[in-house]
Amino acid sequence: MATVIGVRFKKAGKVYYFDPDGMWPHPGDCVIVETARGEEFGEVVTGARTVSDAQVVSPLKKVVRIANEADLRRAEENDRREKEAFSICQEKIARHKLDMKLVSVEYTFDNSKVIFYFTANGRVDFRDLVKDLAGVFRMRIELRQIGVRDEAKMLGGLGACGRPICCGAFLGDFQPVSIKMAKEQGLSLNPAKISGQCGRLMCCLKYEQDNYDAVLKRLPRVGKDIVTPDGVGIITEINAIKERVRVRVKVDDDSFDVREYAIDDVRRPGPGESAAAREIPRDKRPRRPRPAQEPAPQEDAEENTESARRRQYPHQKAPKNLSTEQFLEKLKESGGTAPAGAKEHRRRRGRGRGEEAGQGGEAEGRGERRHGRNRDERPAEAVKDDPAAEPTARPEPAKPEVPAETVREAPKPEVAAAQPVDDSPK
């Protein structure tokens, strides 16, 4: 257990615990406390009291002194300088053309640092801005980006109820709010009606949620059966604020009536109780049974089966190509005869080669006709008159005639005269 006092540094800010250290200030007094940023000026909101160690953030800082006249004058001077710094920073932001909105400026109590709070859609490169601000203020500069909820808390304003917004008046922390709370409370899901100044869901949706959860746990959902003093009925509406429920029950004349009961007068149906009688909508008539289809003839059935099989297998599966090793193994197993898959494969390959050869010859003929050549050396008139005539043998091309002047006799090689061989003995 620890004895602490609660100190707040901003209006509607978070309350921090400090050790009074022998001083007993009253709520409303101003004190100087020691923080991680140095000495700070704050206001006491709760007197000295004892709390558990789990609620205290260790190490517990101490109260330096109760604020005197000099401390109050310094705090007022810091407020005046914050307004001047706000206008100077706005001019610098406009000069650098930065996409950011300045929200507030804060001076530390010892004037060692000035903090600028701003909002932006994304990340902002403000390095040049920090250099300009440091040259003007001659102290440490810190730019801190905050969210839209913190912006609304600092600026304040009036809510849809006509009163100051809760976060700027008394809320110290933001509570998580979801669209499920608006659904369970029966509110309109129009964003303009359930959103606050910040554009997020209103914080006041959290205030009554605990009561709604407690009431809805005691009752089934809308549209389910429930036992009432008049019998089993169906829930049509639940009013959690008044703790009443509207139920549609069946009356004596076989009609249905909607009646309202207190939550304590109704209960969930047990396992042995009958279900509620439900009203049948008049506009919904029972459907007529479809006429039974006559069985199709045998021929039509076979055609349908064949067409279904073709739709299921649009292409026949090609035979599997065998490798050399598989072919030899199959050949040994079959006793020297080639397997059916190999024969089919060779037949397909031969057919493919013949088609390729035919296509190649056809393309070659088209190319020769395109260039004005013809394989047949017959005159054009004969080809034109007798297209079915068989082509004759292709004659050998004649050798070009060479003029007589250009023909020269090749020089004959000189042969040395044979000398007699003397075989007589010397």
Image (cartoon, rainbow, N blue to C red):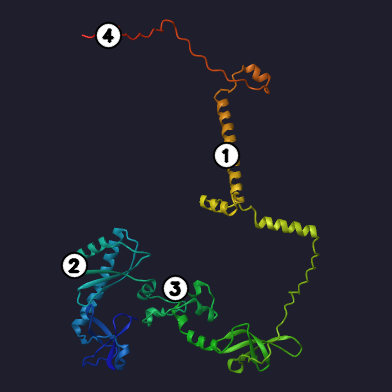
Instruction: Tell me the residue at 61%/53% (across/down).
Output: 317
Q: Residue furthest front?
A: 425
Location of residue 100 with respect to 253 vertically, above or below: above
Asked if residue 414 lies left or right of residue 239, the reply is left
* Residue hosting label 1: 353
Which is closer to the viewer, label 3 or label 4?
Answer: 4
Q: Amino acid at mark 3?
A: Arg
Measure how far apart labels 4 and 1 are at the Cα level: 72 Å
Instruction: Say what secondary structure mark 3 lies in.
Output: loop
Q: Is residue 322 above or below residue 197?
A: above
Q: Secondary structure at mark 4?
A: loop
Camera-side residue of 106 and 163: 106
As shown in the figure, which amino acid type bears the numbered disc 4? Val
Q: Between residues 19 and 56, which one lies in front from this camera angle?
A: 56
Q: Nearer the viewer, mark 4 or mark 1?
A: 4
Q: For mark 3, what is the residue?
A: 200
Give the residue at x 52% y 72%: 190
Q: Residue 243 appears at what percent x and percent y? A: 56, 90
Q: Which quadrant would residue 31 be assigned to in this image?
A: bottom left
Viewer-proximal residue, 325 or 35?
A: 325
Q: Callout 1: helix, strand or loop?
A: helix
Vertical side of 29 occupied by 99: above or below: above
Q: Nearer the viewer, mark 4 or mark 2?
A: 4
Against 167, residue 413 (above or below) is above
Q: Which mark is residue 421?
A: 4
- How far is disc 2 from disc 1 in space, using C-alphas? 91 Å
Q: Are marks 2 and 1 in contact (CB under 8 Å)?
A: no
Residue tagged 2: 138
